Image (cartoon, helix red, strand yellow):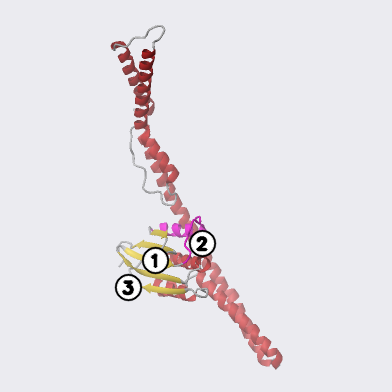
Amino acid sequence: MSLFWRIFLLNAAVLVAAGALLLLGPITVSAPVLLAEALILAGGIASMLGANAALLRLGLAPLQRVTRAMTTIDLLSPRPRPEVAGQGEVADLIQTFNSMLDRLEAERATSSARALWAQEAERRRVAQELHDEVGQTLTAVLLELKRVADHAPDPLREDLHQVQEITRGSLDEIRRIARRLRPGMLEELGLVSALTALTTETPTPDGLRVGRQMEKDLPNLGEEAELVVYRIAQECLTNTVRHARATLLELSLRRSPGGVELRIRDNGRGLGGAPEGAGLRGMRERALLIGAELTLGAGPSGGTEVRLDVPVRNGST
């Protein structure tokens, strides 16, 4: 039965019941109307309105649940879906809304994956150009400076050595940037070695101590999942160094029931009421790409704690 006919029949039933009470009951209406009769009529009308409101609220309750879901659902991870309840158009509306969420989730996952992997490809290209073009050019400059310094007079030689050190420092920085853009160690030596290098090579402010606890015998996550774990760890480390004002950062990677758990904790000033930025949203999108669960909140003793639970694919050991 359609929503129109159900509302119509509910109102008709209330009116018929009210008419039957007037016809069959001992109620009479005088002219002019007596006070007692007016009070009885007012009470009857109020009862009709109350019964009508209760029946309508009961019939339209599923629509209110859908409205709440529309305003509160997380568009990055729209689960759980609203329960299909009610009849007729109400159930059809909820089912259509859930189908729309399914399509949006699938489209978002496809678009995010396409954008993120394109971003990784662009990072590899830039890292390769930094290594091959800029790196080789600075290496040639260093060699030329050395040749000139060897034949220069003593007063000028010291200045040339200083220029050499500045150039060598720039070359080291470019190589470090290239490694951050394209973690070659991740492809060659695996996730544990890549995370160790990340925590070792990332410049940290004075007073920040970085601790690591990583198990060696971890299940195989696959290339994409390992890259996601590395990028999320990299983002967390960068955020802590830049914004947290922490004195301690702890990174752990260990086996968990059904997968691998990455946990990063600091004792900094925490998130507070800061809105979600592009970095945190990017972490959530990366986690969704591999079906991982990302939890972000306060640590047991303050600061910030990020936990990433990565499921192991079937057949991985």
Q: Which residue is mark 1?
A: 263
Give the residue displayed 32% in from the left and 13% down from the top.
Answer: 22
Q: Is residue 309 above or below residue 88?
A: below
Question: Which is nearer the N-term, disc 3 or disc 1?
Answer: 3
Helix, strand or loop at label 1? It is strand
Camera-side residue of 146 and 207: 207
Give the residue displayed 69% in from the left and 93% down from the top.
Answer: 154
Camera-side residue of 2 and 240: 240
Whether label 2 touches label 3, CB < 8 Å: no
Whether label 1 touches label 2, CB < 8 Å: no
Q: CA distance from mark 2 to mark 3?
A: 30 Å
Q: Amino acid at mark 3?
A: Asp
Helix, strand or loop at label 2? It is helix
In this picture, which residue range is highlighted in magenta?
268-290
| Position of residue 226 measured from the top left corner of the image (x, y, whole percent) | 40, 66
Q: Which residue is mark 3?
A: 217
Q: Amino acid at mark 2?
A: Gln
| Position of residue 297 measured from the top left corner of the image (x, y, whole percent) | 42, 59
Q: Assess whether residue 192 is covered by the magenta stretch.
A: no
Q: CA distance from mark 3 to mark 1?
A: 17 Å
Q: Amino acid at mark 1?
A: Arg
Camera-side residue of 25 and 183: 25
Whether label 3 touches label 1, CB < 8 Å: no
Q: Is residue 42 above or below residue 125?
A: above
- Looking at the rendered image, the disc whose residue lies closer to the viewer, 2 or 3, is 3
| Position of residue 245 measured from the top left corner of the image (x, y, whole percent) | 51, 68
Q: Which residue is mark 2?
A: 119
